[in-house]
Image: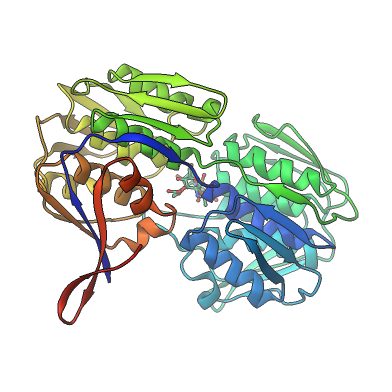
C-alpha cells in the first residue's frame, strides 16, 4: 500500500494546472452509451474513479481508445450487455449512472449498487423515483438494482432532496424518452450543466440546466460528438486553500472562476487575496488565516466537497470558527485525524467548532475519504515536521498527479511504497 509523506512548513509558490472535472467525467462517460456512433471526449482526468468507468464501458462492449493522454474515443455501437457487476463497479459511487444510461439505451439495466466514499448514508431513492416516473420498473435482485421499461415516457419529477446523482440519472434516461420530462428542485452544480451541454451536443433537447427546473424533450436518436470536459472546481478549490493555508502565492490555471466564487468569497473572508483572470485565479496570503464560519449547501452554496479542506485552513486560523455540514449526514470523520496533529476541533452533530492553533505538528494520519485525504495533505503541508498519510487510494480517486502538481509549487511531498524491506520511493 502506498503512502504520502509530506514535510511541512513550505510556502507554495508558482503555477498549477487543474485537470478535467471528476464529477462531470463520471456522468458524461456513461452517457456516451446513448450515442449511435463514436464520441471523442477530451480533458478526461487520469484518476481511478474515471478509470473504473472506462473499464466498465469496455466490459459492456464499448470500444475505448486512448487517443492522447486525456482524450478518449469511445465507440458504444457494440454494447449489448446491460449488466454492471460488482467487480466492474469497483466501489465507485457513479456506477449508478449506468442505470440511467443503460435504461436510456437498452431499456434495461442491472447494476451493482453504488459504493464510493463513506461520507454518510448514500441512498438512491430519488433516482428510482425518477426512473419509475419515466415508466421503468425498479427492483432489487441478488443485491443488484434492476430497472426495466417497455418504453420511457416524459414525466414530471419533483426531487425531495436536491440530489446531483438523481438529477444526472434522470436527465440521461429522459434524453431518449418519448415526450417532455421536467425535473423540479434539480441540482445546479457546474457538472449538471456540463452533462446537459454534452447531451445537447449529441442532439438532445435539454433546457434549464444550472437552474432548479430542467426540461428534457426526449429525442429518437443521439449521435456521436466531440466534447471537452470542464475543469475540476474542487481540485482547483483544494489548491486555492492549500495556497492560502501555506501563506503562499499560487496561480491556478485552467479554471472557470465563476465556479469558484463561494470558495473565493470564504478565502477572502479568511484574509486571502484572490485575483481572477479569464481562465485562472491567483491566491496570495501574507498572514495567518482569520476565523470564519462556513455552511455547506448545494450549488451555488459552499460545496460540501471543499468542507474538509477549508476546515483544515480554519484549524490554523486566528480565532474560533464554526463549520456546518448541510449536505451529508456525516462528513467530519477527518476531524479526529486533524486532532492527532494538534488541531482543536469539537464535532457536535452537523457542526464542528474549530479553535485555530498556531501550528499543526506532523503525525501519522489516514485519508478517511477523498476530500478528507485532500485535507490531510493540506494539514501536512502546513504542519511542522513529517506527516505520513495512509489509505491514499481515496485520494487517487479524484486528484490527478497530486504529488507532481504540489511539488511544482514547492511542496515536499512523496509517494512511498511499503515493501518487505521497508519503505522505497516510487515514481508517482
Ligand atoms: C455527488 O454525489 C458528488 N459525487 C459528491 O462528490 C458530492 O459530495 C455530492 O454530489 C454533493 O455535492 C459525484 O458527482 C460522483 P447527492 P451524489 O445525490 O450525487 C441525499 C466527491 O468528493 N440523497 O447530491 O451521490 C444524500 O444522502 C464526492 O467528489 C437522498 O436522500 O450526492 C445527500 O444527503 C463525494 N436520496 C444529499 O441527498 C437520493 O436518492 C445529496 O446527495 C440521493 C441523495
Instruction: Determine if residue 228 is in view.
Output: yes
Give the side of residue 35 with respect to residue 123, left or right: right
Relative placement, left or right, of 361 versus 180 is left
- 249 is higher (above) or lower (below) than 420: above
The image shows residue 425, relative to residue 59, as above or below, that is: above
Is 305 displayed left or right of 46 in the figure? left
Quadrant that contains the N terminus: bottom left
State whether residue 232 is above or below residue 394: above
- Residue at the farthest right position: 220
Image coordinates for residue 363, horizontal then vertical, percent:
11, 52
Seen at 85% across and 62% down, the residue is 36
In depth, the one of 396 and 175 nearer the eye is 396
Q: Nearer the viewer, residue 230 or 324?
A: 230
Q: Residue at x 28, y 20 (%)?
A: 270
The quadrant where residue 266 appears: top left
Q: Residue 317 at x, y = what percent?
A: 18, 26
Q: Residue at x 57, y 36 (%)?
A: 189
Identity of the residue furthest to the bottom in this view: 420
- The quarter of the rendered structure image containing the C terminus is bottom left
Locate residue 406, reporting x and y percent. 33, 45
Place of residue 204 in the rendered image (x, y in percent of width and height, measured from the top left)? 82, 46
Q: Is residue 200 left or right of residue 362?
A: right
Amino acid at each position: 500500500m502506498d503512502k504520502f509523506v509530506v514535510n511541512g512548513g513550505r510556502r507554495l509558490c508558482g503555477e498549477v494546472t487543474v485537470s478535467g472535472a471528476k464529477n462531470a467525467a463520471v456522468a458524461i462517460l456513461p452517457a456516451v452509451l446513448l450515442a449511435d456512433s463514436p464520441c471523442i471526449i477530451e480533458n478526461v482526468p487520469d484518476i481511478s474513479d474515471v478509470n473504473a468507468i472506462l473499464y466498465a464501458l469496455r466490459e459492456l462492449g464499448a470500444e475505448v481508445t486512448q487517443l492522447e493522454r486525456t482524450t478518449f474515443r469511445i465507440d458504444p455501437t457494440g454494447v449489448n450487455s446491460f449488466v454492471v457487476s460488482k467487480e466492474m463497479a469497483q466501489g465507485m459511487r457513479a456506477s449508478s449512472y449506468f442505470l440511467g444510461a443503460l435504461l436510456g439505451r437498452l431499456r434495461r439495466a442491472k447494476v451493482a449498487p453504488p459504493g464510493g466514499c463513506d461520507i454518510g448514508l448514500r441512498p438512491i431513492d430519488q433516482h428510482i423515483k425518477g426512473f419509475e416516473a419515466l415508466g421503468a420498473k425498479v427492483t432489487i435482485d441478488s443485491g443488484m438494482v434492476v430497472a426495466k421499461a417497455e418504453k420511457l415516457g416524459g414525466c414530471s419529477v419533483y426531487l425531495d432532496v436536491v440530489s446531483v446523482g438523481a438529477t444526472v440519472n434522470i436527465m440521461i434516461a429522459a434524453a431518449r424518452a418519448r415526450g417532455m420530462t421536467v425535473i423540479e428542485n434539480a441540482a445546479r452544480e457546474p457538472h449538471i450543466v456540463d452533462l446537459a451541454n454534452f447531451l445537447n451536443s449529441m442532439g438532445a433537447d435539454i433546457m434549464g440546466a444550472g437552474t432548479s427546473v430542467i426540461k428534457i424533450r426526449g429525442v429518437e436518436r443521439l449521435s456521436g460528438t466531440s466534447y471537452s470536459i470542464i475543469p475540476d472546481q474542487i481540485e482547483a478549490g483544494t489548491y486555492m486553500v492549500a495556497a492560502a493555508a501555506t501563506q503562499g502565492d499560487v496561480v491556478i490555471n485552467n479554471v472557470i472562476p465563476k465556479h469558484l466564487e463561494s470558495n473565493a468569497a470564504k478565502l477572502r473572508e479568511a484574509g486571502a487575496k484572490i485575483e481572477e483572470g479569464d481562465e485562472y485565479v491567483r491566491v496570495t496570503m501574507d498572514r495567518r488565516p482569520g476565523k470564519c464560519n462556513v455552511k455547506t449547501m448545494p450549488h451555488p452554496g459552499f460545496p460540501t466537497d471543499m468542507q474538509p479542506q477549508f476546515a483544515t485552513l480554519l484549524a490554523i486560523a486566528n480565532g474560533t470558527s464554526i463549520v456546518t455540514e448541510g449536505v451529508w449526514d456525516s462528513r467530519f470523520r477527518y476531524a479526529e485525524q486533524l486532532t492527532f496533529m494538534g488541531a482543536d476541533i469539537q464535532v457536535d452533530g452537523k457542526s464542528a467548532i474549530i479553535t485555530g492553533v498556531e501550528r499543526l505538528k506532523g503525525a501519522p494520519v489516514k485519508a478517511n475519504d477523498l476530500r478528507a485525504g485532500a485535507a490531510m495533505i493540506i494539514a501536512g503541508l502546513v504542519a511542522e515536521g513529517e506527516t505520513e498519510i495512509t489509505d491514499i487510494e481515496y485520494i487517487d480517486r479524484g486528484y490527478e498527479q497530486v504529488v507532481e502538481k504540489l511539488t511544482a509549487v514547492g511542496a515536499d511531498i512523496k509517494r512511498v511504497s511499503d515493501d518487505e524491506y521497508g519503505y522505497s520511493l516510487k515514481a508517482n
